[in-house]
Image (cartoon, rainbow, N blue to C red):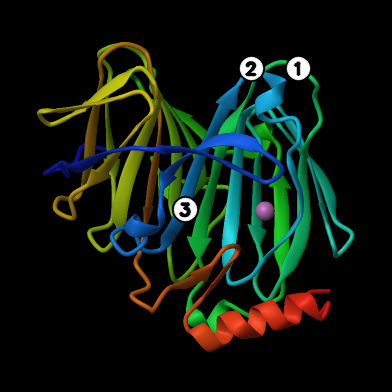
Amino acid sequence: MNIKHSRSIEQLVTGVATSDGAGVKLTRVLTGKLQRRLDPFLMLDAFGSDNPDDYIAGFPDHPHRGFETVTYMLAGRMRHRDNAGHEGLLDNGGVQWMTAGRGVIHSEIPEQEDGIMEGFQLWLNLPAKNKMTAPWYRDFPSAAIPEHVTQDNVTIRVIAGRACGIEGAVMREDTEPMYLDIHLPADATFDAAIPATHNAFIYVYRGEVSVGDTQVGAQRMGILSNTGDGVRLTANGNTRLILIAGRPLNEPIVQYGPFVMNTQEEIHQALNDFRNDRFA
Ligand code: CO
């Protein structure tokens, strides 16, 4: 499908090197100061290393409340366990979608001692009315992610939302998230339709893409302007990127570490509930 008017790149963002969990090295691409601009998205971490020291310690038991986490593993194996007794293995090309809702305590631990571990974790906010919903999660192995290949040999993996007439692995009301992994051969072009209501960005993890006159290289995020009916992506060489879009909630965002609520009182409540073992 061709779009009429492409969004442009409003801002290029270089992530911030940091570590989290028990010392996992990662790049925080979407940081706190972009939460308002990219509402309903709260965080995007990119991780990628073939040095086990960078990832082996993983993320031991930690809580979440008030939002959803979406982990997309490009390469590697990670074991997930939570306080509701769920357990799952996330590996090459698989996605774990978790709705923390009123509270989850979980661990995310690599199940490999060498090789490459590469992927993303995205935090998607929940509307106020759903922040205390029952926790939910699902693991999607790679084969369960719907894919479409265009005439130009562009592969689109539809993790969430609708693209190329197909429905993604996860559909959500309220924020209507769209999460695409797009693989473009050199010089190929792909038009992605994006609802006008949505905030959107791309993150290039291989190669380089042109959007209008702007080049977005590897390890760069391009925030898309809120004009136009989609985005036209043209690859300068073999390129892989994720395209993420969602309908903003326009509600207050109050974050304290792994708790994201609407008010300070709700954060105090979350801390209290966590300390008093009420996340079970
Ligand atoms: Co977590």
Q: Residue at x 85, y 50 (%)?
A: 87
Residue type (three-letter) at the residue carrying disc 2: Asp
Residue 191 image offset from top left, x and y in percent = 26, 35
Q: Is residue 54 left or right of residue 262?
A: right
Residue 97 image offset from top left, x and y in percent = 64, 52
Image marks 2 and 1: residues in contact by CB distance under 8 Å: yes
Q: Residue at x 67, y 77 (%)?
A: 271
Spatial separation of the CA atoms under disc 2 and disc 1: 7 Å
The answer to whether the residue bearing label 2 lies less than 8 angstroms from the nearest atom of ligand 1 is: no
Return the disc, 1 or 3, that comes first in the chain's sequence.
Answer: 3
Residue 35 image offset from top left, x and y in percent = 37, 61
* Residue 161 visible to an observer of this rendering: no
The N terminus: image quadrant: top left
The C terminus: image quadrant: bottom right
Spatial separation of the CA atoms under disc 2 and disc 3: 23 Å
The residue that label 3 is drawn on is: 43
Q: Residue furthest right?
A: 85
Count of marks overlaid on the render: 3
Residue 45 image offset from top left, x and y in percent = 51, 42
- The secondary structure type at the circle numbered 1 is loop
The relative height of residue 125 versus residue 87 in the rendered view (above or below) is below
Return the disc, 2 or 3, that comes first in the chain's sequence.
Answer: 3
The relative height of residue 278 versus residue 201 in the rendered view (above or below) is below
Image disc number at residue 137? none
The residue that label 1 is drawn on is: 114
Spatial separation of the CA atoms under disc 1 and disc 3: 27 Å
Q: Residue at x 29, y 50 (%)?
A: 194
Q: Is residue 28 left or right of residue 272?
A: left
* Residue 142 visible to an observer of this rendering: yes
The relative height of residue 84 versus residue 170 in the rendered view (above or below) is below
Image disc number at residue 50? 2
